[in-house]
Amino acid sequence: MGGGGEVKPGKSQKGSAQRHLNAGFVAGGLLMLLVYLVAQHFAVSAPHVVITEAQEVMDNIKAQGETAGKNGKVECKMEGRSDTCEVDGDVRTNGTALSVTLVPATWSERREWMIRPYSRRFASLRKVAVTQLQDPAAAPPCAVTHSTPAVLFAIGGYAGNYWHDYADILVPLFVASRRYGGEVTFLISNIRFRPQWLVKYKAFLRGLSRYEHIDMDADEQVRCFPHVTVGLRLDKEFSIVPELVPGAPLSMADFTAFLRETYALPRGAAAADRKTKKPRLLLIHRGHYRRILNEPEVARAAEAAGFEVAVAELRGEAGEAEQARAVNAFDAVVGLHGAGLTNAVFLPPGGVLVQVVPYGKMEHIARAEFAGPAADMGLRYLDYSVSAEESSLMETLGPEHPAVRDPDSVHRSGWGQVFELYLAKQNVRINVTRFAPMLQEALHHLLRQRQ
């Protein structure tokens, strides 16, 4: 070929590459235009349908962290005893609908959870609908905007039983809200069924929140919050697992310290302020069932061991502050298994809780409710298991009755029979000779606190 028609190496390849590059830009432009048209079509014709490929292409252009930050998030934990959700972002509540809604800044997948706002999921209570909206435009407008986070919970379930008040609500509420230092609003459902509950625990609630609570069942306004915790978690019966606490770790020692602060309890250590006096022991009187039939004899045995003794009935309906101060004046509490032992939360650290366990292989249940919790509070825990000879069942049912002869068979028959026979129909007559070593152990523990 002549010189004018010669193809030089490199020059032809460069021109070819440029032409391919131009074609690529054109194709890319057409693709982006197609994506835009498809997205617009879905946005106009089907606003409640999740956009798939077109939305994914558009989302991938944005930084993932930025998108997640704008849209907020819902994290639900549905395991163990409890179901809870942490809803963060533009959160809107509707009391009468009992709903909590996360409003995203951009299109998002719609999701929904049904959460019972109580620490035991099997309790019979109305559930809260927690929803992550798809379309921000579908969100109800805010009637009231709050700058504080909120905790939504119910006071139904087993509320009204003193032990359950603490184990199911007050301890979990402390765990959920203490991190906010009072800057939190409580959204409470089921108030109309237990209005006196709020009266009894007013000081406790005020210690955790500087704001008036909101009655969710009567609230018709849409309220906006930056964060809402839905439900309460129960990770350990009547206690706290520090590593599972949101924010800074908390313990049952922190909880009892909070109670001493809330109710202005003077004693922060057992026996230390009574070095020249006998340690004080409170023997809990029960006025109906599960009674200690020989209370005066047990009181004399405690006095003989070296205690100053008082016998008193601790009733759940009593004023909380007054009862807290009364119990805080003692170094040890002795009582039959029951809600009255919950008052151990007011004992000064280093004190002693002695639980008298009814006959019928009830140790596992009794210890689950009080042994670990007492130790977590900084108390010495002791228990005394009642023998068949010390139980009223020996007289009322006879030695050959299965409840006396074979407690395992009663447990196999279910909780109803266990409760009726061993908790509702049993009184005890403590053998004070057999009980004396436990009183001595409690006394020696308290005397060591003085050294």
Image: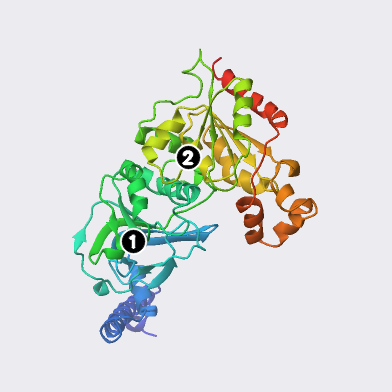
Q: Residue furthest top?
A: 276
Query: What kind of residue is marked 1?
Result: Arg
Q: Amino acid at mark 2?
A: Leu
Depth check: 163 or 209 in front?
163
Q: The N terminus lies in which quarter of the figure? A: bottom left
Q: Secondary structure at mark 2?
A: loop
Q: How many marks?
A: 2
Q: Position of residue 80 (x, y in %)?
A: 55, 57
Picture quadrant of residue 60:
bottom left
Q: Does 440 sit above or below residue 10?
A: above
Residue 431 image offset from top left, x and y in percent: 71, 34
Image spot of residue 134 (x, y percent) = 33, 73
- Up-down relation of residue 85 to residue 348 (above or below): below
Of labels 2 and 1, the one closer to you? 2
Q: Residues within 10 Å of mark 1 (few under 14, many from 20)?
A: few
Label 1: which secondary element? helix
At which x and y percent is residue 341? 53, 40
Q: Quadrant of the C terminus?
A: top right
The residue under label 2 is: 314
- Would you say the residues marked 2 and 1 are in contact, meaning their CB atoms lie under 8 Å apart? no
For this orientation, the residue located farthest to the left is 143
User: Which label sits on residue 192?
Assistant: 1
Q: Earlier in the sequence, mark 2 or mark 1?
A: 1
Q: Above or below — where is 104 with respect to 237? A: below
Q: Find the distance from the CA under tag 2 to the CA under tag 1.
A: 26 Å
Question: Is residue 4 left or right of 331 when viewed as pictured?
Answer: left
